[in-house]
Amino acid sequence: MMSSRSTTAASRPARASIAALAAVFLLIAMAPTARAACLHDGMRVEGQLRRIETRHPNGTRLSGYHLFLANPICVRAERSSGGKGTLSDIHTVQLVPADDSVARELDSLLGARITASGAFMEPQTVYHTGDIVLLDARILVVADRPAPAAERAESARGAGEPETAPETSARPMPSDPAEIRARFARFIREFYLAGYDLSAEEIAEIYAPRLFYFGKARFPVKRVVADKIAYYKRWPERRYALLEDTLRIRPARQRENAWDLAFEYTFELAGPRRTRRGRGIAYITVDLSGGRVRILREHGKVLKRF
């Protein structure tokens, strides 16, 4: 990042899909009412585990593990027509276990709220009974223990969505400094430096209506939107890497539930006629209050060109 807004394009980190932000901050402090949005391969998805049974049109019995989500999400997934696409209004995720040991573990966790990861795929056959399919699924976190056996059996007999979605509690910010650092580092890697484009609407949702933006106070978000969209067009190919030992975190002054982050990163940018490589530093302030995430400050500069 350069020292002024007009010269920041060569190094300003691109933003990932807004889903990355939601997913990461569910681990930090986001309220359960926050908007769920697009996830991509390898990211975490959380819900209540159930086994759904139905029948193939030819009469064959079908059974599968599903996560029922507290809030609908959208997902960047492999499409049946080829390539990646965005699927919206996802309420259930069908898990395809990575191996037999994962399948056995899923059997023991029916009724629990779990977190899993894998590769997303659009449902392609009648054997796919979820809104989205998670291939090579692995269990990462078990947030609460399974219901009693009788209740799990009743759940397994259900063939549709529950009458009410399972509750998901927001997790408080941990008191362990190492854990705080690890979670913010993941936020930077999987959202701030992920290199995905955002729509104008997503940018407007992430940034405060007015913010400190590359040296200018009370900068309107509509101008941030224009700047980001122009940046995406100027540099359609972008790659960034966080230098984790440079990350500094502190509570923001005079504002509850907000955090100042400073970190260095390397960047590689490619446009139609030119490329850029180097090292930069970023300064951002993230507000976690009110059940949503907002960027209140963004600044930085290029430290070195390669």
Image: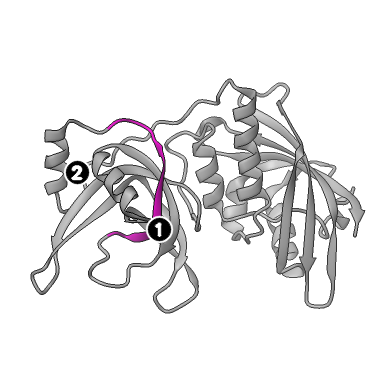
Identity of the residue drawn at 64% across and 27% down: 178
Residue 192 shown left or right of residue 101 in the figure: right
What type is the residue that disc 1 sits on? Answer: Asp
Label 1 crowd bin: few (<14), some (14–19), many (20+), radius 10 Å: some
Identity of the residue drawn at 91% across and 57% down: 305
Height in image: 213 above or below 222?
above
Identity of the residue drawn at 39% across and 75% down: 80
The residue singled out by tag 2 in the image is 163
Q: Position of residue 229 (x, y in %)?
A: 69, 63
Q: Foreground residue, 267 or 250?
A: 267
Residue 213 showing in the rendered view: no
Mark identifier at residue 136: 1
Q: Position of residue 157 (x, y in %)?
A: 11, 48
Q: Main secondary structure of the magenta part?
A: strand
What type is the residue that disc 2 sits on? Answer: Glu
Label 2 crowd bin: few (<14), some (14–19), many (20+), radius 10 Å: few
Q: Secondary structure at mark 2?
A: loop
Q: Position of residue 282 (x, y in %)?
A: 79, 44
Which segment is the magenta one? Answer: 130-145
Q: Foreground residue, 225 or 141?
A: 141
Height in image: 237 above or below 195?
below
Q: Which image quadrant for residue 219?
A: top right
Q: Foreground residue, 240 or 289?
A: 240
21 is within the stretch colored magenta: no
Q: Secondary structure at mark 1?
A: strand
**On the rendered image, what quadrant is the C terminus found in?**
bottom right
Height in image: 273 above or below 213?
below
